[in-house]
Image: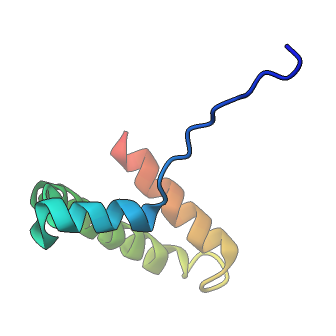
């Protein structure tokens, strides 16, 4: 179609969206839904880092301390224990 005009819709950028949210809903709306996520994520991350740290301590006696192998196996052990 020669000469046909194309109307493109330009979506607003993130700063424009942020401005609209703040104007229409207020600053508290930016944190809506954060509580349940923190309740679920915080304990999960705590368990992960505790398991990772314990594995690292034990593997530092087997491999070179704080080597790549220690970090990789420690992370993999957590994934294995999770399944």
Q: Residue at x 37, y 74 (%)?
A: 54
Q: Is residue 75 visible?
A: yes
Residue farthest along the right direction in this orientation: 2
Q: Residue at x 61, y 86 (%)?
A: 65
Which quarter of the rendering shows the C terminus? top left
Horizontal placement of 56 versus 49: left or right? right
Question: Which quadrant would residue 63 be assigned to in this image?
Answer: bottom right
Viewer-proximal residue among 43 and 23: 23
Q: Is residue 42 visible?
A: no
- Count the marks: 0
Residue 28 placement (x, y as % from top left):
10, 69
Residue 79 placement (x, y as % from top left):
44, 50
Horizontal placement of 34 versus 62: left or right? left
Viewer-proximal residue among 11 and 77: 11
Q: Residue at x 50, y 65 (%)?
A: 74
Residue 71 placement (x, y as % from top left):
58, 71
Q: Residue at x 85, y 13 (%)?
A: 1
Instruction: Look at the picture and state if 13 lies above or below 53.
Output: above
Viewer-proximal residue among 49 and 9: 9
């Amino acid at each position: 179609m020669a000469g046909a005009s194309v109307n493109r819709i330009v979506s607003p950028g993130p700063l424009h969206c942020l401005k609209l949210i703040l104007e229409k809903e207020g600053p508290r709306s930016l944190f809506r839904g954060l509580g349940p996520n923190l309740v679920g994520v915080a304990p999960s991350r705590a368990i992960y880092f505790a398991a990772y740290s314990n594995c690292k301590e034990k593997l530092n006696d087997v491999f070179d301390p704080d080597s790549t192998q220690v970090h990789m196996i420690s992370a993999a052990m957590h994934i294995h224990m999770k399944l």
